[in-house]
Image: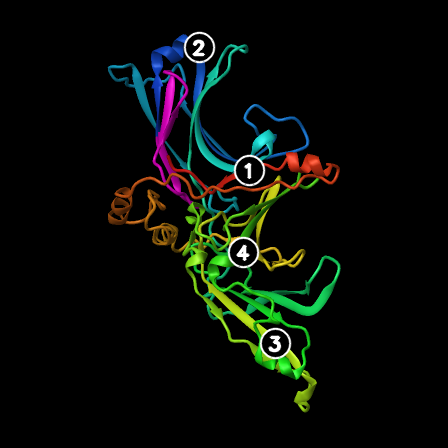
Amino acid sequence: MASHTDTLLSIHITPGLRTPGAVVEGNARLHIEKLREKEIMEVAGRLIGEALSPSADTVSENGYRLSDVFLKRDVVLWTPQTVTEVDVSGFATIPFTFEIPQDEKFPPSFECVGRRGVNGAVEYRVEVVGLVKKYDQKDVRASATFPFLPFDTTPAITLVNCSRQSWRKEKNIRKALLFSTGAHISAEISLPKVEALPIFQSIPIEVKITSFSDWLSQSASSSPDSHLPPLPQNAYDLDLKWICQMASKVGEPIIVPIAIIPGMKESPRTHYVSPPAWQSALEVQAPQWMLKDDLNPSKGGRWSREIIFRWSPTLTCPPSFETSLFTLQYRVELIVHLPGMRNDLQLQTGLLTLSSGVYPEQPEQAIISYRSSREQDDVRMVPNTNIDREYLEQLEALPVVVEFFSMMAACSCRKTHSVPERLRLAWPLRIALWKVV
């Protein structure tokens, strides 16, 4: 992985995922004669972790408005007094090594880029900077980025057998815009009740949707379909989404809801979750007649029907985190579409925390889990250097990760904006956990 500014200097680092305590190795190629001609006082290597976030101020040149450098390590690579060997082209190759601190809590790599400077990112990179002596000239630099994932601090548990938490909502069915009936539907989302849901691990989700007819006479007990509101008959028709919520801490909070699972429908943007939800089964139960009075069937009753959707996705999106500039959390959203105006039911869970699913005793598990969840994608990721050489060679045989995922999102603006202004400022956003080039 390398980037170049000009013929003065360039940088190369070993590509791959890093975790706390990992080593970042690489080398800088310096054209010694040209450095002296340009009067470079010093060439420094820097390990940098930086959070970038929007604010109410003007946009900077790189599109970001505020910066928080939470990690910085420096080392001097070259000075005019340094004696180095050069090759036939005049370049000297100078190696460097940085170690990511293990006792500090750093956020994962993250990128959310939009129009008009509304951005958010967490970036890890190594820079080689040539410090220019003349004040009216810019320093020369080259940089290379790498992905970072923090260790999971929550206990490792099996999500299948743990206790669960639920969110439920009911809605009356309307026959016209202003008139409701006794018929209604209810929806419920059930998730494991844990401190944090780990990525790279199956998360069992259960959705129940129940429809109820109005109270009917006993003569209606033989015709359920004509009285029950229609419900989705397969998983493909459900609208279930994970919502990534980024909240800026600068000025007035800016909330960016990001739909990272495009409902139940097949989409090219399903590669950050496995398996796709639309491939899962939906259990449609037979209609049930419920008596109004168990002791007197002649008083009639009502029909009910329940559908149950079970899905165990494995997510590869960024885990939740908090910096001095913004926070990142998640929700699950369900929308049930029914015929008629204002009959759709929308249900959201509370804020959910995702953890990295990578533990200090098994840092290489992130690579194995990620590869198993995306067998058809290209992968080249390197764990900590204390893994045995045979395992590293197997990883080196894998191709390169281009991108974890990309998606569309809308930005919800401040209350001071009018409705047309909010619509105008709604734009597509792109979010990626990391890139390995």
Which of the two labelled residues, at mark 3 and mark 1, occupies the earlier sequence position? 3
Which of the two labelled residues, at mark 1 and mark 4, occupies the earlier sequence position? 4
Q: Nearer the viewer, residue 373 or 6?
A: 373
Q: Which mark is residue 239?
A: 4
- Which residue: 24% across, 15% down? 88
Query: Residue 251: in sight, yes or no?
Result: no
Q: Which mark is residue 303?
A: 3
Between circles 1 and 2, the one closer to the viewer is 1
- Please, what is the three-letter code of the amino acid marked with disc 3? Trp
Which of the two labelled residues, at mark 1 and mark 2, occupies the earlier sequence position? 2
Q: Quadrant of residue 312?
A: bottom left
- Which residue: 57% across, 79% down? 288
Q: State the residue position of label 2.
A: 39
Specify start and end residues of the magenta stretch as a single range: 1-26
SS of the residue under disc 2? loop
Task: Please report contact status of discs 4 and 3: CB closer than 8 Å, yes or no.
Answer: no
Residue 20 colored in magenta in the image: yes
Q: Which mark is residue 428?
A: 1
- Please, what is the three-letter code of the amino acid marked with disc 2? Glu
Q: Quadrant of residue 342?
A: bottom right
Which of the two labelled residues, at mark 2 and mark 3, occupies the earlier sequence position? 2
**Number of residues whose C-alpha sits closer than 10 Å to that of mark 3, classed few (under 14), some (14–19) or many (20 or more):** many
Task: Please report contact status of discs 1 and 2: CB closer than 8 Å, yes or no.
Answer: no
The C terminus sits in image quarter? top left
User: Relative to residue 146, is residue 344 depicted above or below?
Assistant: below
Which of the two labelled residues, at mark 4 and mark 3, occupies the earlier sequence position? 4
User: Relative to residue 115, is residue 90 depicted above or below?
Assistant: above
Between circles 4 and 3, the one closer to the viewer is 3
Q: Give the side of residue 391 with respect to residue 310, left or right.
A: left
Instruction: Give the alpha-carbon distance from disc 2 to disc 3, as whole Å.
Output: 85 Å
**Number of residues whose C-alpha sits closer than 10 Å to that of mark 2, classed few (under 14), some (14–19) or many (20 or more):** some
